[in-house]
Image (cartoon, helix red, strand yellow):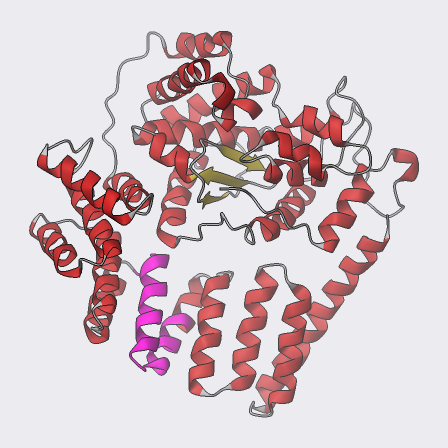
Amino acid sequence: MKSRLLVRPLLFSLLLAFAAPPSLRAEGLPDLGETSQADLSPAMERRVGEEAMNEIRRDPAWLGDPEVNAYLNRLGNRLAAQIEGSPQSFELFALHDMTLNAFAMPGGFIGVHTGLILAAETESELASVLAHEISHVTQHHLARLINKSGQGQVASLVALAVAVLAARSNPDAAVGVAMAGQAAGIQNQLNYSRDFEREADRIGLGLLERSGYDIRGMENFFGRMQKFGRLYESNAPVYLRTHPLTTERLADIGNRIQGRRYKQVPDSLEFQLVKAKLRAAEGSAQDAVIEFKSRLADRKFSGSELAVRYGLARALMRSGNLPASEQQIDELRRLKAHSPMVETLAAELRLKQNDTAGAVKILRAAYAQYPQERGVVYGLVDALLMAHQPAEALRVTNDDLLSYPSDATLYALQARIYAALGQRLQQHRAQAENYALEGRLGEAIEQLELGQKAGDGSFYEQSQVDARLRELRQRLEEEKKLAKQK
């Protein structure tokens, strides 16, 4: 899948301002320093990452699957919990792209292609790649790359982040988004140095081991990628283009593992279910059905029978064979498959059979058992809206926002709920919060202005809208001032 990179005006202006030579850099903008000054503030890195995330959420490859993203974040948080010193926050997300790649952006944002998840034969292998990327973040390698002596002009961290996005499927495309004569410099900096790669390997192995995963997962996965790259040099994994994988590097990983006691680590059911969900969505529905049926008939589970049956149920549902899909779900329940992913699938199937009440019943029970699961929460709210129960849906979102006040999806759902209730001021207010969390300040302000004109809010609600509108207008003015300083 090809990437369609959208660069909003603020990010474009930041890119130009930071990429300009020091003599042309505007006053008031953060100074990245000379090549000898490698440190950038965590706040600046986070801000750049957030700006880049605003762009990538608009990319056609953005998966936005709450269950896949929740799994990646649980895996990432398990690894990050082993980081020594000050805690670093991370946000992991999946992109629907069958190329083998993962990439880190400033501020702790890590993208993972679905192709890489499917290529991982064990959970430890997937964890090893994430541990490696997390280590790039903790060691501030992206920030250090732009200041590394001998790498040409000092480029913008923003420009580098944009180039990373453009290069996620095709590294050569990064040159096309590099501005102000920085193309060659940014492209050269996209490739991590051997020293940075070894450092990420070393630290990543430590995170992997302390998290309880099999450290041989890193050697196995990278070794397989190297063999694939040698066999198909013209179509080598994108990951190898930005993460140079040398024989010496693999030998170094092997030396660090040598002598360690072998530890067999079973894969989690969630890992197997996520892979099955992604596999069931690839290619034609009929091909997916044939693949899972074949694995089931041959007893070739490559992990879990539950995951194979789950994948088959999804593929059958996708093909329109709803009764057969229902049979697989019944079999999953007989085999005691305890997972929120099974419950959301069962509810989704009920909705496809126009059994809204049945879907609500399944999701209510799942919500009681898995109240923190984003997929369950979103599914329940959707089902309640379809069942014409907006008041109950509103209660769910209000309760959930107490624990997840920065969940943009919840605000989007809440806007739909208020629309169903006929509460226009609250509808626009909720939609404004959704836009604000996605970095779309202009659209958020427009929604609040519409809320002011709705005329159906209390004095207290109107005052809240007025106060929030002043706050967002001030933020937008600050961004506009920054955009003009170039």
Is residue 401 or residue 274 the one in the foreground? Answer: 274
Pinpoint residue 196: horizontal percent, then vertical percent: 59, 20
**Does residue 115 sit above or below 215 in this rendering?**
below
Is residue 364 in view?
A: no
Residue sitting at 51 percent across and 16 percent down?
245
**Does residue 454 sit above or below 22 in this rendering?**
below
In the shown orientation, is residue 297 left or right of residue 219?
left
Pinpoint residue 64: horizontal percent, then vertical percent: 44, 53
Can residue 210 be found in the magenta stretch?
no
Is residue 311 or residue 335 the one in the foreground? Answer: 311
Is residue 423 or residue 234 the one in the foreground? Answer: 234
In this view, which residue lies farthest toward the left? 334
In the shown orientation, is residue 450 left or right of residue 34?
left
**Does residue 433 sit above or below 251 in this rendering?**
below
Residue sitting at 35 percent across and 70 percent down?
382
Which span is picked out in magenta? 371-397
> How many marks are shown on the rendered structure?
0
In this view, which residue lies farthest toward the right? 23
Residue sitting at 65 percent across and 69 percent down?
443
SS majority, magenta: helix
In the shown orientation, is residue 462 left or right of residue 311?
right
Q: Quadrant of residue 289?
A: top left
Pinpoint residue 471: horizontal percent, then vertical percent: 70, 70
In the shown orientation, is residue 419 left or right of residue 364?
right
Is residue 135 or residue 452 the one in the foreground? Answer: 452
Is residue 333 in view?
A: yes
Residue sitting at 49 percent across and 86 percent down?
423
